[in-house]
Image (cartoon, helix red, strand yellow):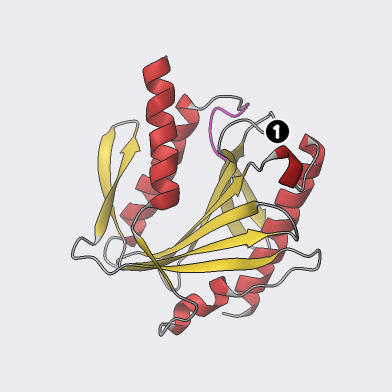
Amino acid sequence: MKALRVLVLVSIINALLLPSPLKSQTTSDDSFRPYLSCSFDDGLKVVDTIHYLKSSEKFRELNTPSGKRKVTYLDGYTVKFAYPNTDVFVNLKVEQSSPRSYDRDKEIIIENMKWLLSRGKAVDEKEPKKVTVNGVEIYGFDRNILGFGIVMGMHLFFEDKNHKVITVYFLNQKPERRKPQTLAEYRALRDKFLNQYTKCVTSRQ
């Protein structure tokens, strides 16, 4: 059991940190712009934008119930969001998939979420939840204990027109620098972010 916990932790850390990033505030690819500059009505704002380093390898490996599988990425950004005087609340990744491999990549990424969920702690779901917000299908799961682990929730959606994969990690924060103080408050902030972010992105396409 200890080995499984370590494996899941490593998988989450790798998801948050890889591919290697390079800080940047601009992009020459207009298809990324809608995802990097959304604003919110409750004080949440972008505090960092990171452009992935170019790499000769255009794929990454993900664990799935059937073993490790490769998904493509041609380019991507990490966007971090925080409320005033708090730690980062959202770590969001938007990645460009290869058009030829996009449909297969979607299946593998959802399978990876199932793999993480099957080994996760403090979660109620057995399968990723699927909800529709502003016409966008979102897959995800959340922990049922506030402050447990590095990631409080993981949600993802796909933008078929431009072959984008968007993964949203809601992060746990230090108690003294935490915005939500209860599980109910966390869920309300999660829902508000997903609602306002998807509305922002879809309105710009």
Percent of width and height locating residue 95: 41, 64
SS of the residue under disc 1? loop
Mark 1 highlights which residue?
Answer: 146
181 left or right of 81 in image: right
Percent of width and height locating residue 146: 70, 33
The structure residue drawn at horizontal position 56% and vertical position 79%, both measured from the top left corner, is 205
Count of labels shown?
1
**In which quadrant is the N terminus drawn?**
top left
The structure residue drawn at horizontal position 70% and vertical position 50%, both measured from the top left corner, is 190
Which secondary structure class fits the magenta region best?
Answer: loop
132 left or right of 51 in image: right
In the depicted structure, whether residue 52 falls above or below residue 90: below
Residue farthest toward the left in the current orientation of the protein: 56
User: Who is closer to the viewer here, 17 or 165?
Assistant: 17
> Dot 1 surroundings within 10 Å: few (below 14), some, or many (20 or more)?
many
The stretch drawn in magenta includes residue 202: no
Percent of width and height locating residue 107: 38, 48
In the depicted structure, whether residue 169 falls above or below residue 46: above
User: Who is closer to the viewer here, 94 or 89?
Assistant: 89
The structure residue drawn at horizontal position 80% and vertical position 36%, both measured from the top left corner, is 182
The image quadrant of residue 187 is top right
59 left or right of 186 in image: left
Please indicate, yes or no, whether residue 50 appears anywhere in the rendered image.
yes
In the depicted structure, whether residue 127 falls above or below residue 102: above
The structure residue drawn at horizontal position 43% and vertical position 44%, both measured from the top left corner, is 110
The amino acid pointed to by label 1 is: Leu
Please indicate, yes or no, whether residue 115 appears anywhere in the rendered image.
no
Q: Which range is magenta?
A: 124-129
